[in-house]
Amino acid sequence: MSTTISLLTNVMSKVSSPIKTAEDLLKAYRAGQRNFANISLVSADLTGVDLKGADLSYADFSEANLSQSSLRGTDLSYARLCEANLTEADLRGAMLIGTDLREAVVEKAQFQAADYDPDETHFPKGFDPKAAEMRADR
């Protein structure tokens, strides 16, 4: 029994992300890391950050401030961006398949050529992905 618990603890420690703060994320990105799948930075201040091309799939950025950030070409598939501030963010060419953007602020954000799933991607009320020049994945 204790061997099983020890093995499980060891596996879980390798699965959990060492990225716990916005500073951790930026430091790892500057060091060349691009895979940040499953990170959780709820309510983080990421104003003006450059995360072009990063894998942020399944990440939780609920209530985070990503205003004026460059998220160009990022994979945000199945990420949570509920109530996030994306004012003037650059999401051109991003993957937004299954992304939850409900109640996000998207004023002046750029979404051209971003991919989305009409059935699984959730947008703020009144947001029109076609008017934003997004591409339906289906």
Image (tube, rainbow, N blue to C red):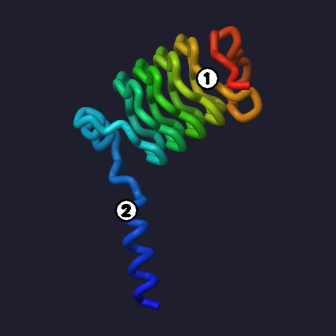
Q: Amino acid at mark 1?
A: Asp
State the mark number for residue 14. 2
> Tag 1's secondary structure?
strand
Q: Residue furthest bottom?
A: 1
**Marks 1/2: CA–CA distance:** 31 Å
127 relative to 98, above or below:
above
124 relative to 134, above or below:
below
Position in image of residue 36 (x %, y %):
41, 42
Position in image of residue 96 (x %, y %):
59, 29
Q: Is residue 110 left or right of residue 8?
A: right
> Who's the residue at 63% across and 32% down the image?
97
Q: Is residue 26 left or right of residue 94?
A: left
For label 2, count other residues whose C-alpha is less than 10 Å away and answer few (under 14), some (14-19) or many (20+).
Answer: few
Q: Quadrant of residue 8?
A: bottom left
- Total number of numbered discs in the rendering: 2
Q: Is residue 117 left or right of residue 79?
A: right
Q: Earlier in the sequence, mark 1 or mark 2?
A: 2
Q: Closer to the camera, 39 or 108?
A: 39
Q: Quadrant of residue 129?
A: top right
Q: Amino acid at mark 2?
A: Lys
> Who's the residue at 57% across and 14% down the image?
113
> Tag 2's secondary structure?
helix
For label 1, count other residues whose C-alpha is less than 10 Å away and answer few (under 14), some (14-19) or many (20+).
Answer: many
> Who's the residue at 47% across and 18% down the image?
89
Q: Closer to the camera, 132 or 55?
A: 55
Q: Is residue 56 left or right of residue 10?
A: right
* Quadrant of the image containing the C terminus: top right
Instruction: Identify the residue under disc 1.
Output: 115
